[in-house]
Image (cartoon, coloured by chain):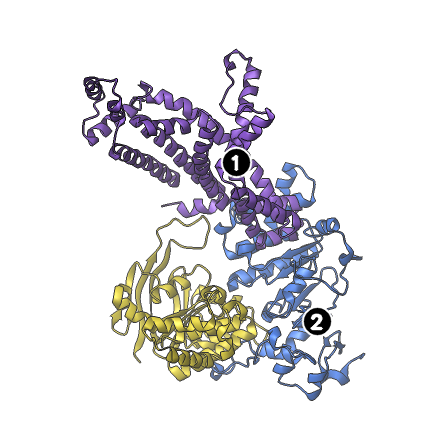
Amino acid sequence: MRYLLRRFAHAFFLLIGASVLAFLFTTLAPGNYFDEMRLNPQIAPETVAALRAQYQVDRSLPLRYAAWVNSVLHGEMGFSFAYNSPVAPLLLVRARNTLLLAVTATLLAWGIALPLGVWSADRLGHLPDRMLSWGTAALMAIPDLGLALGLLMLAVMTSWFPAGGMTSVDFETFSQVHKLRDLLLHMTLPVAALVLSALPLLVRHVRAAMADVLDAPFLLAAKGHGIPQYRLLYRYALPAAANPLISLFGFSIGALLSGSLVIEVVMSWPGIGPLLVEAILARDLYVVIGGVLFSTLFLVGGNFLADTLLYWADPRIRTETRGQ
Amino acid sequence: MQALLRAENLVKRYPRKPPPGSPENLVALDGVSFAIVQGTTLAIVGESGSGKSTLAFCLACLERPTSGSIWFGDIDIAKLTGEDLRQVRPRIQLIFQDPANSLNPRWSVSEILSEPMILQGRTNRDEITRRSHMLLERVGLSCELEERSPSELSGGQRQRLAIARALALEPEVLILDEALSALDCSVQAQIANLLMELQSSLGMTYLFITHDLGMAAHLADEIAVMNRGQIAEQGPTDKILNLPRHETTRRLLAAVPGLPRGTPPGLEQ
Amino acid sequence: MEALRGVSFDLKPGEILGVLGESGSGKSALASALPRLLPWNGKITKGAIRFEGKDILQASPKELQGIRGKRISLIFQEPSVALHPTMRAGEQVRQVLAAHEPWGKNAMRERTRQVLSTVFPEEVERISESYPHELSGGQRQRVLIAQAIACGPSLVIADEPTASLDPTAQMEIIEVFRTLREKRGLAIILITHNPALLAGLADRVLVLYCGSIVELGPAATVIASPRHPYTKALFGSIPAIFEENVSNRKKKLAAIPGDSMSASLPLTGCPFEPRCPERMQKCRKHEPQLMELAEAHAVSCFLFEGQSKRS
């Protein structure tokens, strides 16, 4: 238990550190939202000065950070200059959309990678296994962007799937069932792009972890007891191979998140990705910080989940950390 | 005669809570004191969990005792650090139980042998090669094995290599932590003969840690019986074997699977 | 490389056969070959294994899976790696039962407890709930034995069951085997490199050297008066704990010179010849066959050529 509390504290301090760094880098970067405004000849300099005063952009850095932390504690995350609205609700909606993609893609990718990797390891060295290796290698060579664009092209050419966006124009008029169907149709391509980009690495790691375990003496001993093959694979081998895979799981969440950023932009999925890109270009300070923080939250949360899973899955870790 | 190595009230405590029912004690060493005379062999016998290996590691300065002293001549090596400790290390060497795990499987025999010499500061390659050959011959290994890796050697050959590596540093004390236990019976005899021959020609002092009373009886001048981190009984080999006083000693003697060659005098029912 | 050459023996129900062999003798190959668990690079090229009337070499994979664990069980070396690291001990025994018996949950639990209490007279509950890394070496070994006897096999093959244990734990394991034979009529093939273990436990002893049988006979005879030079040399190299003569201490042991690695094996003749203290000219050119001397005691050595009951 103390192990988990330590990991949690670790995650918490990581978040704080990330927020400080985000704040630091964005404000240190030259220019701010109002500089862009100044370039616009239609807006009078006095207006700009007034706006600057209103947003208190000229206060010192630590003060602004303190004010921001204060507002976070109250459930707000600052104010977006570009959208002219509080950041938090803006981000939350986008975060929900990104999570929808990322979680679905994670579950699907692992759901395919596990049986595929186990199946491949069971036939190690034989033709089916080797063909799978070539396939994953080929898939790994294609960049995420290429996958996304390729799928978009597929959508345009066949009209089976909508080419981007999250919902159809007349989404609100649909019935519940129709709404669900529409959402799923829109989700298919981005999720497919994410899954295809993540799959090869996962499959290879599952296969490698299983191959290591399949050589272990306890597996041969179990075979000697007459345990049937499928149980040997899933009840004996896979749990023993789980440790590196659980760590990989934590890592894959982070990878899928950063992958989703690109895919969201390309496929016009209204997640954190496009919002972040816009905000960076417009120097919309608090949106950028909020976006970075959310991404960090997902990453850290994913790894904490992996730590928890590891603790639960491997009794040896529980014993070693007892009394620490 | 002068005691070369003397342990005084060694205590070693491990901070973690042991798993339930495991024989490992929280207190691995609970006030251990003994002395070894130079040129002799002291056998430390005991069951698993009695603290024998912890003692070996403390004496070899691989672990620091929680309290107590280890007198090597007139230096307390339990308190040494840094450069002083590094000076002492070559004089006490440790041979491990599992020859497969204590030798780097990726290095060749010659690399394994030359490493300690290089660390000592010898850099002349010809001299290193000459010494390596001499060491191999000393332990009964053929120089042809120079380029092999440990995984290509048999258990007995690996253990000989481990001994050669230890000898490269010209130690005064050799601690053998169950060094024969993983070997076949006939190979144990070969290595035991080698050790005895080295002792008589080089005058080395041995600390022989084992749970094999038969081999201990054959090799040791004195036996110390350990139980739960303490020395239950210690004395000359004959006395311990024939007149065991502590319950642990009796138990160990009774458990020896011996070939029927005569019942032990002290245990006749 | 031939791990076993022309090894033939039989085993009666309830008999304990001790197989004495050092590394390179082929004992582990023998242990794995009997339930057909050889690694991917091992093959049985000749011979038959008849078990309860059937030749196992002809059995299909499905039949084999039904035999392993249920009729023939193998207890592996090294209990620390032969148990699944993240499964509780009781669960590991239960898995063996579940693989062969179609019982319900309660019956299974009861049976698991029964099996475990055969090898753990006390503390069954605690051991059952423990993970392997929480148990001592002797306890792990007993869990392995529990797995082996769970389905009531008629033959158990134990490969170096006491190798990594201290003397007290060794005694306990030997007691367990003795009890199993008495209470359940279990036939046991006990493979070890330490002849002292077989004294008082085995009915017959088989001595393996470089893949061939060099001596086979009743345990009492083989141990008290070994005939083959290898067997004699092996017994002679073990220090006797209670020396009649104190000056034997720290003297050279009568170790067998050289080793039995396959690289140094002679191409023709008796495999032990290079190290044999009683070798003759004949031994270099011809390989001796197993010859039966008196009282069902067979030796494979030219020294006994004239004494064989049948040549």
Q: Amino acid at mark 1?
A: Leu
Label 1 and label 2: CA atoms lie apart by 74 Å
Determine which quarter of the picture holds residue A303.
Answer: top left
Instruction: Identify the residue at the far front of this view.
Output: A41
- Quick check: A48 above or below C136? above
Identify the residue at image location x=69%, y=61%.
C33
Q: With A66 as the anchor, is B97 left or right in this view?
A: right
> Are circles 1 and 2 on residues that touch, CB within 8 Å?
no
Task: Give the SS element for disc 2.
Answer: strand
- The image position of residue C62, as x and y in percent, is 73, 48
Crowding at mark 1 (Cα within 10 Å: few <14, some 14-19, many 20+)? many
Residue at 35 percent across and 32 percent down: it is A292
- The chain letter under disc 2 is C
Residue of label 1: A147
Chain letter for the purple colouring in the rendering: A
Q: How packed is label 2: few (under 14 Cα within 10 Å), some, or many (20 or more)?
A: some
Q: Hey, what amino acid is under mark 2?
A: Pro
Q: Which residue is mark 2?
A: C218
Q: Which chain is yellow?
A: B
- Percent across and percent down for residue C221 are 68, 75
Residue C43's disc number = none
Chain letter of the residue beneath label 1 in the structure image? A
Q: Relative to C158, is B120 on the left or the right?
A: left
| Residue B35 can be seen in this image | no
Foreground: disc 1 or disc 2: 1
Question: Please, what secondary structure does the residue beneath circle 1 have?
Answer: helix
Q: Quadrant of the C terminus of chain C?
A: bottom right
Tell me which chain appears blue.
C
